[in-house]
Image (cartoon, rainbow, N blue to C red):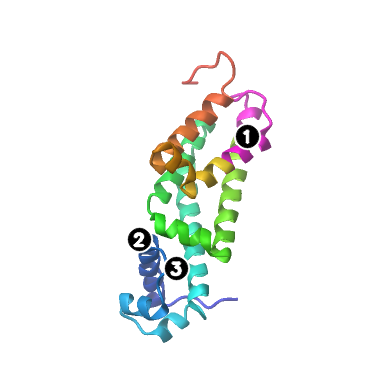
């Protein structure tokens, strides 16, 4: 069981997350980080045993916080279409906080990439659950929910890594909006009203 963070440690992690999101972490040494955050290296070692472990901790914290904020955003939404749209909009909003350098560093370092991939799989699972719910409620047409969710997951991953947005010349937010439209239009029951 891990010890609870002190208030100073929690504040330091918040500042560290902001630094990493803005600049990435691959190029930073522990000396750089300590200097930027005006703390000692021993203070950083109290959070993690190495720069790599610190990166894993901060990246995990970012994705956990993002998931919690997205879930809070969709809590209480009963309309499954609004839930999917709001979920994807929340993902776009969270990703807009991350610089290209951060995403590249997360992708380049296997332990943080694993965290990232778990997050993308969790997002695909949530979308699958939304699709299954919509099919059961007869809001969506009968579809292979797992297939739709996996396709959405691949698109989410492509947006998160910047591949899709670079090729299409759009922002993450525009890409997530388009993904929402693609999913909702593709799932719509024949002859169903957009405003049911």
Is 4 inside the magenta-drawn segment?
A: no
Q: Residue at x 67, y 36 (%)?
A: 147
Q: Secondary structure at mark 1?
A: helix
Q: Secondary structure at mark 3?
A: loop
Q: Nearer the viewer, residue 26 or 111?
A: 26
Residue 193 to residue 178: above or below: above
* Residue 148 image-quadrant placement: top right
**Sequence-wise first label, 1 or 2:** 2
Q: Residues within 10 Å of mark 1 (few under 14, many from 20)?
A: some
Q: Secondary structure at mark 2?
A: helix
x, y (%) of residue 85? 47, 35
Quadrant of image for the N terminus:
bottom right
**Sequence-wise first label, 1 or 3:** 3
Q: Residue at x 50, y 21 (%)?
A: 196
Can you tell which of label 1 and label 3 is closer to the viewer? 3
* Residue 183: numbered disc: none
Residue 170 to residue 122: above or below: above
* Residue 12 image-quadrant placement: bottom left
Q: Residue at x 60, y 30 (%)?
A: 134
* Residue 148: numbered disc: 1
User: Given contact means CB atoms under 8 Å apart, are the residues at marks 2 and 3 in contact?
Assistant: no
Over which residues does the magenta segment extend?
Answer: 131-153
Q: Is residue 82 visible?
A: no
Q: Main secondary structure of the magenta part?
A: helix
Q: Is residue 45 visible?
A: yes
The residue tagged 2 is: 22
Q: Nearer the viewer, residue 179 or 122?
A: 179
The residue tagged 3 is: 26
x, y (%) of residue 38? 30, 79
Can you tell which of label 1 and label 2 is closer to the viewer? 2
x, y (%) of residue 127? 58, 40
């Amino acid at each position: 069981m891990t010890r609870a963070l002190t208030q100073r440690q929690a504040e330091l992690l918040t500042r560290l997350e902001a630094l990493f999101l803005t600049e990435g972490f691959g190029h930073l040494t522990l000396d750089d980080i300590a200097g930027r955050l005006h703390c000692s290296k021993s203070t950083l070692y109290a959070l993690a045993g190495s720069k790599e472990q610190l990166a894993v901790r901060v990246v995990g914290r970012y994705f956990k916080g993002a998931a919690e904020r997205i879930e809070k955003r969709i809590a209480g939404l009963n309309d499954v279409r609004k839930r999917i749209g709001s979920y994807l909009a929340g993902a776009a909003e969270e990703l807009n906080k991350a610089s290209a350098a951060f995403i590249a560093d997360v992708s380049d370092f296997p332990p943080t990439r694993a965290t990232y991939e778990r997050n993308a799989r969790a997002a695909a699972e949530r979308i699958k659950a939304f699709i299954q719910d919509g099919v059961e409620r007869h809001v969506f047409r009968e579809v292979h929910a797992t297939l739709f969710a996996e396709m959405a997951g691949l698109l989410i991953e492509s947006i998160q890594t910047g591949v899709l947005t670079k090729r299409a010349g759009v922002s993450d937010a525009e890409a997530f909006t388009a993904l929402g439209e693609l999913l909702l239009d593709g799932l719509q029951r024949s002859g169903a009203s957009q405003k049911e």
